[in-house]
Image: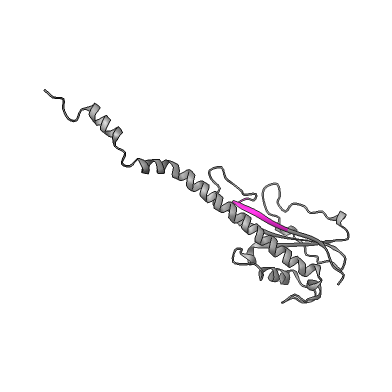
Amino acid sequence: MPPPACSSGNLLHRFRRNRRGSAAVEFALVAPLFFGLLFAIIETSMIFFAGQVLETVTQDSARAIMTGQAQSGAVTGCSTPCTQAQFKTYVCSQISALFDCANGIYIDVRSYSQFASVNLATPIDASGNFLAANMQYSLGNAGDIVVVRLFYQWPLFVTGLGFNAANLNNSKRLLTATAAFKNEPF
């Protein structure tokens, strides 16, 4: 009598030999790590790009203070001298659609008599909160040392799988751009 066609050994051999669907199973195992890494790379590149845009805007805006344009009201939309709100409007006019400028950009302008007296504290407290109340606005006079800092709280989306670039609460990263210079004689 011949052995039955569906013996357990025969079924196991046919199951091991059948490769249909193995690519889908392998992809299902690798996909979460692949997409997590891909999104982490994209988010990191967006953080760097946003930081570069913020640096460029800071340098361009600081030039208006360094040359005395902000102090004399020569900046478009400014009185003599530019108020903090007017200077923020000037900064926001240079920023593309990458930032929520009206609600997210914070400007800190401080003037000093000499470089040795510059003291810039971190704007993040021990609990990871941004200290927006500590922002100052002092354009300085001709020959003064001025430090212009722009801050933006960048929201993060990929914080799982061990990748977390946040330095603030609520999964945000504080982007900071700084320009330090001596005002020209205007």
Colouring convention used in this rendered image of the protein: one colour
Vertical comparison of 67 with 160: above or below:
below
Residue, x 66% and y 59% (percent of image)?
52
Residue 49 lies in the magenta stretch: no
Residue, x 61% and y 55% (percent of image)?
47
From the top left corner, tell me how far across and down residue 162 is, in percent.
Answer: 56, 42
**Quarter of image, res 136:** bottom right
From the top left corner, tell me how far across and down residue 30 is, in percent.
Answer: 44, 42
Total numbered badges shown on the rendered structure: 0
Vertical comparison of 126 with 175: above or below:
above
Q: Is residue 135 left or right of residue 174?
A: right
* Front residue (pair 33, 117): 33
On the rendered image, what quadrant is the C terminus found in?
A: bottom right
**Quarter of image, res 182:** bottom right
Residue 173 lies in the magenta stretch: yes
From the top left corner, tell me how far across and down residue 157 is, in percent.
Answer: 54, 52
Q: Main secondary structure of the magenta part?
A: strand
Q: Is residue 84 visible?
A: yes
**Residue range of the region highlighted in magenta in the rendering:** 169-177
| Residue that extends furthest to the top in the rendered view of this protein | 1
